[in-house]
Image (tube, grey):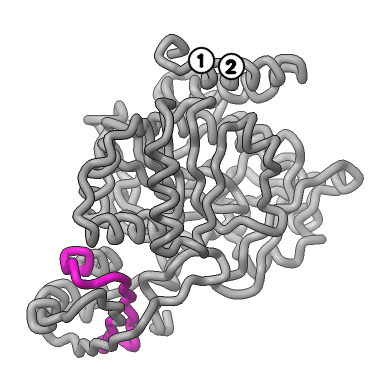
Amino acid sequence: MLFKMKFGEKIRHLFYWFLDFLKGGKVKKHYNDIKFILENYNTTKSKSKRDNYLLDILNHAAKTVPYYKKYSHFSSIEDFPVISKAMVRDMKNFISQAYVSKKSFEISTSGSTGTPFTVLQDKNKRIRNTADTIYFGEKAGYKLGYKLYYIRLWGGTLRKSKLMSFFQNVETVKSNGLGERAIDNLIVEIKKGVSNKAIIGYASSLRDICFYLNTKDTNPLGVKMKSVIANSEALGYSTRLSLKKYFGIDPISRYSNMENGILSQQILGKGTNFLINWASFFIEILEIDRDIPVKHGEIGRVVVTDLFNYYMPMIRYDTGDLAIIDIDKNNFDSIPVFYKVEGRRMDTIYNTSGEPVTYAVYDLEYFPEVKQFQLIQENQKTYLIKLSIDKNFEKEDKLLNVFHKSLGEDAIIKIEYVDEIPILSSGKRKLTISKLKL
């Protein structure tokens, strides 16, 4: 691997692992553990490791966490209740009494979908997340030392000093300031130098970049792009094609959250399914309205047990997201993977027959006149499509026909033209809103 890296990249790569070595090699140990568990999933040793991690966190929670002490005589994880974000906000009930005097790290979500949400993590959990990030970055084509353009909402606790950015070779890009001039400047920066490059950012930000490049009839950029990772939302097929055209590499989607970490990710060269991070989490897919596992291939709620956060154990935490899990015999050696991640339940769009069809919003990417868009479900059969148009739009009838096929022939679809779809406090642009009372 190293001989393919530029000199400066090699120095940064080796320097990172040297510093880790001086600190006891903790990141490396976690990295090797993650790699072994996921790449030997069906072996007895991998299964034993996963089972032991689960049993250890359950025992720890039942003995030291106020909320879980009543479950001290559990026989399996199913004896524990499913918890919600609202319940975890009562933080004092979920903090381990064995860790309360130890150093903690505060992780807060932006609160773009409601009240800000805070979780406390111990140092070992933070190291595990770092190792997860390195491992899954490599599976998307990224290596420590590459020039990384990181597009997200920066500010508050999410800051990088100039010195840290230099050593990590990271260029921070503000998603809430990604106008035409900022995109122009970003492309100029990306085209500079001969180093290997990578991008990670919100799917909506990558979509904005592609739309702008499309309007300029831009040619392929001809840069040494090794990795493009989209997080927070799914990527539409049209945006995937544009990213491949301009950057010369297939983009990868990552499913993660702030409170836990990387839950799953697509793997470069392994199709569209998501490798679940079984090394760091125990994940269940439960029915929408009952705490009962769904059959493989059926959509359900993503419920996560974090195997490494001992400061504030989260056992059977309902993420609020929907997904489909199944066995992949072709690309992942019969490992259970996510075939589809629908995203947040509150943002899921349903057709008039009550089936989830959130993917329908991406049909709008096939209309080049549409700069930004949003699909809102008002009730079971009424929908509103908000469009920000770059030029005259004369395809309303075609657009309505496309959406009637996805939403139902009896769907009532309204179109509203707006100047812009606003960016949320999280730095993302919400593509779907559901007002259904589920």
* 142, 23: nearer the viewer: 142
Q: Mark number for residue 11? A: 2
Residue 368 x, y percent position in the rendering: 18, 66
Q: Residue at x 65, y 70 (%)?
A: 86
In terms of secondary structure, where does tag 1 sit? helix
Specify few, some or many for label 2: CA neighbours under 10 Å numbering under 14, 14-19, or 20 or more.
some
Work out which quarter of the rendered image holds the N terminus and state it: top left
Residue at 54% x, 24% y is 48
Q: Quadrant of the C terminus?
A: bottom left
Which of the 4 quarters of the picture holds residue 274?
top left
Specify whether residue 376 is painted magenta.
Answer: yes
Residue nearest the observer in this picture, 414 or 101: 414
The residue labelled by disc 1 is: 7
Tell me where residue 94 appears, x and y as whole percent: 76, 56
| 245 in relation to 119, above or below | above
**In the picture, residue 353 is in which quadrant?**
bottom left
Q: Is residue 72 left or right of residue 366?
A: right
Cα separation between marks 2 and 1: 6 Å
Res 183 seen here: yes
**Residue 323: in sight, yes or no?**
no
Instruction: Find out whether residue 399 is within the magenta segment.
Output: no
Q: Is residue 81 above or below residue 413?
A: above
Q: What is the span of residues highlighted in magenta in the rendered image? A: 364-385
Q: Quadrant of residue 12?
A: top right
Q: Residue 141, which numbered label? A: none
Residue density around tag 1, few if under 14, some if 14–19, many if 20 or more, within 10 Å: few
Q: Residue at x 25, y 37 (%)?
A: 271
Numbered disc 2: secondary structure:
helix
Query: Looking at the image, do the residues carrying marks 2 and 1 touch, with CB atoms under 8 Å apart?
Result: yes
Where residue 292 appears, as percent x and y from the top left, is 44, 58
